[in-house]
Amino acid sequence: MSLDLFRLDGKVALVTGATHGLGMAMARGLGRAGATVVVNGPSSQDRVARAVAVYEADGSRAHGYLFDVTDPEAVRQSVERIEREVGPIDVLVNNAAVIERTPLLDMTVDAWKRVVETDLTGVFVMSQPVVRGMSERGGGKVINICSMMSELGRDSVGAYAAAKGGLKMLTQSMATEWARHNIQVNGIGPGYFATAQPAPIRTDGHPDDLAGAAVFLASAASDFVNGHVLYVDGGILATIGRPQEA
């Protein structure tokens, strides 16, 4: 087997929510494997520009676009602009997400809707126009960033768990419908990593640990992998206790 199967030279990879954290770690991995990285952010052009500078410092080709993944018209226009200015999107990583740490009895309906709209509906909204182009060109890769909460509940993150559980099933439905177009749709389920968001409960995982999984699912090496969620969690889901330290 040639390691060229894992190369992404000539590919354009759009990673939503990749101005920081896990999204940036995965996008940097894709760029280092040869992809042209397109980074999305929802609220700050300066933040997008700073992220692009990080990718370029890696030696990657990178472009940044500001739009909200929950806005269908903004998404449609942005996808058209990206494909006009950068090139056809070969890889879509649906990473943009929010979390609300509030017990269900205390959560407002507006807070619930915000989480589900971003973490689940936003993936559907983002994928539609991108996959239409992929299907016309005869193939592509979609990677949905799921969660351990796609499998397990946890106190105070009910909306997030509901959205990520739904995203697992959406991933399988996308894989089922789009396989006929040579489009593979898979998920990555991160464990607890050293980022600001899960600081109270994280373990020793480093965001860079996700890069290999992202490259694998974006590359030709995963052409016969479809509808799968790859959990990168250090073994947490394999045990009812914390994995033993080395």
Image (cartoon, rainbow, N blue to C red):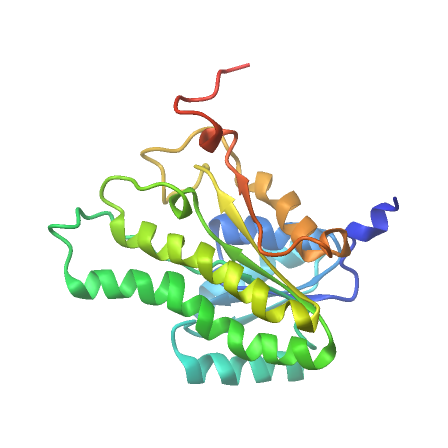
The answer to whether 213 appears left or right of 240 in the picture is: right
Which corner quadrant holds the N terminus?
A: top right
Examine the rendered structure and indicate whether residue 223 appears above or below residue 204. Answer: below
Please tell me how many numbered marks the rendered image carries: 0
User: How far from the left and from the top, in percent, is residue 108?
Assistant: 14, 60
Decide which of 178, 163 is in the foreground and name it. Answer: 178
| Residue in the picture at 71% in, 71% down | 139
Residue 111 picture quarter? bottom left
Which corner quadrant holds the C terminus?
A: top right
Examine the rendered structure and indicate whether residue 23 appears above or below residue 191. Answer: below
User: How far from the left and from the top, in percent, is residue 19?
Assistant: 49, 58
Examine the rendered structure and indicate whether residue 170 appears above or below residue 209. Answer: below
User: How far from the left and from the top, in percent, is residue 209?
Assistant: 59, 38
The answer to whether 146 appears left or right of 221 in the picture is: left
Q: Residue furthest left?
A: 106
Decide which of 46, 67 is in the foreground and name it. Answer: 67
| Residue in the picture at 31% in, 42% down | 153
| Residue in the picture at 36% in, 45% down | 197
Residue 234 appears in the figure: yes
User: How far from the left and from the top, in percent, is residue 214?
Assistant: 62, 50
Residue 43 appears in the figure: no
Decide which of 93, 51 is in the foreground and name it. Answer: 93
Residue 151 picture quarter? top left
The answer to whether 57 appears left or right of 108 in the picture is: right
